[in-house]
Image (tube, coloured by chain):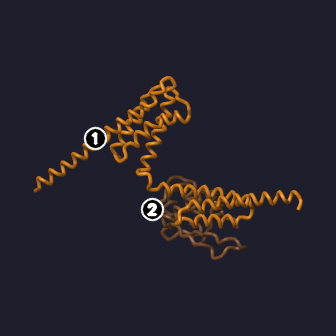
Amino acid sequence: MSQVRLSQSLVIVLGQLLAEPDQWRYGYDLSNATAVPPGTLYPLLVRLADAGWLVAKWEERGEGGRPPRHLYRLTASGRREARDVIVRATKRGWAIGLRPREA
Amino acid sequence: MNDNSRVNRAVDALWIRSTNAVTASTRAILSEGRAHWGDAIFAEVQAQHSPAERLRFAISAACGIYVIAARDALRGRIANSRAVGWAAALGISAATIDLTADSRWPMTVLVGIGCFTLSIVIPRAVWRWPLLTGGILPLMIALTGDAGPYSYDRGDQWMPLGFTAVCAAVGVLLERMQSTRRILARLSRITSNQ
C-alpha cells in the first residue's frame, strides 16, 4: 500500500468520507460538501484508490437517462488510515472545517 | 423560430459542445487502467442541471485528470526525480539571487556546494547536476532578457556552469576513490581470510 501525502484537502475529504463511512458518495456531492474543487478532488480520489483506502463502484442505473455515477467509500483499512490522518492533522493544528451536508 | 430562441439554442449547443470536448479529452488522455475516471467525470457532468455548472465542473475535473495523466507519464521516467527537483530549485534560487545581489559569492557557494554534494550522493548521470544548478543562470537570462550584472560582460554568465562542472567532476572523482578503496579493502579481507 502506497503512502498518501498529507494535505489540507486530503484531511477535509477524508473527514467527509468518515462522517458517514457506510454511505456511498459521488464526486459532485463530495466537492459540494467539502468545498474542494473537482480539479483537486479527483486527483485525491485517484491517489486514495491507488493506496487502497478507497473503493469505487458504479451506480446500478442512472436516473432520468443520464449515465450511472461513480460512487466512493472508504475501505476498512482506509477508515483506519483516515482516522490516523485526522489525528495527525489535528496535532499539527490544522483546522478541519467540515461543512454540513445539504438536505 | 425568432432570433432570440435561435441565439439561445446556438449558445446551448456551444455549452454542450465545449463540455463534451473537455470530458472527452479526459477519457482520451488517461491510460487504459485509469480510463474509468474519465467516465466517472463524464457521468458526473451529465448529472448537473445547468449548462454553466456542467462546463465549470468539467473544466475543473479535467485539470485534475491532466495532472494525474502527467504524473503517470513522468513516473519512473526521470531517475531521482526528487533530487532533480531540488537541484532545479537550487539553480533557480541561486540565479535569482545572483541577478540581484552585488556579490557573486552567494551564487558560487550555493551552486558549488549543491552540485558537489549531489555528485557525491547521486553519481548516476552526473551531467544533470551542473546543468540544473549552474546552467539555470544563462537560461534565465535568455528567457527574461534581463542580464542584470552580466549586461557588460555577457560571457561571464557561463562561469557558474563551468564552475559547477568542475565541482561535479571533483565530486564524482571522490566518490569513485571511496568506492575503489571500499572494493580494495573487501578484496584484501577476502585474500587474508584465505
Q: Residue at x 56, y 34 (%)?
A: B144
Q: What amino acid is labelled 1 in the image?
A: Leu
Disc count in the image? 2
Judge from the rendering whether residue A63 lies leftward or rightward of residue B145; answer left or right: right
Q: Residue at x 38, y 42 (%)?
A: B127
Q: Quadrant of residue A14?
A: bottom right
Q: Residues within 10 Å of mark 1 (few under 14, many from 20)?
A: some
| Rendered-image quadrant of the C terminus of chain B | bottom left
Residue bearing mark 1: B174
**Residue A88 is at least partly visible in this image:** no
Q: Nearer the viewer, residue A83 or B108?
A: B108
Q: Residue B50: x percent and y percent? A: 75, 62
- Chain letter of mark 2 equals A
Q: Secondary structure at mark 1?
A: helix
Q: Quadrant of residue B112?
A: top left
Q: Residue at x 43, y 36 (%)?
A: B134
| Rendered-image quadrant of the N terminus of chain B | bottom right
Q: Residue A71: x percent and y percent? A: 60, 70
Q: Residue at x 45, y 62 (%)?
A: A2
- Chain letter of mark 1 equals B
Label 1 – label 2 distance at C-alpha? 36 Å
Q: What amino acid is labelled 2 in the image?
A: Ser
Q: Nearer the viewer, mark 1 or mark 2?
A: 1
Can you say whether B25 is above or below B154 in the image? below
**Where residue A2 is drawn, which disc sits there?**
2
**Residue B168 is at least partly visible in this image:** yes
Q: Residues within 10 Å of mark 2 (few under 14, many from 20)?
A: few
Q: Residue B72: x percent and y percent? A: 50, 58
Chain coloured brown in this rendering: A
Chain coloured orange in this rendering: B
